[in-house]
Image (tube, rainbow, N blue to C red):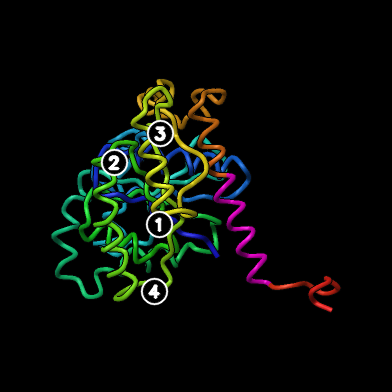
Amino acid sequence: MAKAIAVANQKGGVGKTTTAVNLSAVIASSGFRVLLIDSDPQGNATSGIGIQKGSFRRSLYHALVLDQPLSDVILRTDIDSLFVVPANKDLAGAEIELVEIEKRELRLKQALASVESDFDYFIIDCPPSLGLLTLNALTAAKSLLVPIQCEYYALEGVTELFDTLARIRRLHNPGLTIEGLLLTMYDERTNLSAAVAADLRDFYGQPVFHCVIPRNVRLAEAPSYGKPIISYDPNSRGAVAYSQLAREIISREIMYESKSAGPGPGSATGL
């Protein structure tokens, strides 16, 4: 069963798409089958993974609104085991058109169910808002990953996002968990980044990832070449950071599955 991770924050410019693209690429490069779902009408995850705008006829819009099979929308990327459901400006109309559709918050969940056996991970890049597209993503997801820029104003939006999370758990997806809070654009040269990181860890504790994503020129350049950072510059600090993030997520999943399975035959605790 594929694990669906929604990458969301209603505040823009916090590294959300950068995280969705690069996390997807690193996990896929580790041998897992990954589907990156671009649910942002800006389509930056689509272009950031190397799919040129205008080079495809179908997008997530066709699956959500027009009931076309998701399998007809999925595109290959240059990375083995990494696939993408692209987005373009058509998706902007989905926010309005979905309002009239029955069970509109379940459209993405239903679409993903049809291809769930083909993948190990779904990574959903959400738009910088808390509208119907993000609601669909959080209803479909198993967990929520929240990128947070290392500045004080960025912390204010986390409370609002968590209030939304509580409502979605209550009304649509009781199993939704916090994958983690990810510090982005971290600059070790400034006291501000260190202070924000310390405050976040003190307040939220364990959900904050150990790794942080640094400010990195190569990481900022990669999208303009349509490449994730591990393809553009695998030795850069940005590539190393996202590799660390992927390891944290994969190891947490392995630990969770191990605990869920319980002690195996012949183990000390199983005797």
Answer with mark 1 or mark 3, whichever residue precedes in sequence: 1
Q: Tell me the element at label 3.
A: helix
Side (left or right) of 3 relative to 9: right
Q: CA distance from mark 3 to mark 2?
A: 32 Å
Look at mark 1 in the image and give the residue it sits on: 144
Disc 4 to disc 1: CB gap under 8 Å: no
- The structure residue drawn at horizontal position 46% and vertical position 56%, both measured from the top left corner, is 179
Specify few, some or many for label 2: CA neighbours under 10 Å numbering under 14, 14-19, or 20 or more: many
Q: CA distance from mark 1 to mark 3?
A: 24 Å
Q: Tell me the element at label 4.
A: loop
Side (left or right) of 256 relative to 211: right
- The secondary structure making up most of the magenta span is helix
Q: Tell me the element at label 2.
A: loop
**Viewer-nearest of labels 1 and 3?**
3
Q: CA distance from mark 3 to mark 4?
A: 34 Å
Side (left or right) of 26 relative to 42: right
Answer with mark 3 or mark 2, whichever residue precedes in sequence: 2
Q: Amino acid at mark 4?
A: Pro
Residue 223, how many percent across, how many down?
A: 37, 28
- Which numbered disc covers residue 194? 3
Q: Is residue 258 magenta?
A: yes
Look at mark 4 in the image and give the residue it sits on: 174
Q: Amino acid at mark 2?
A: Gly
Q: Amino acid at mark 1?
A: Leu
Answer with mark 3 or mark 4, whichever residue precedes in sequence: 4
Q: Which residues are magenta?
A: 247-261
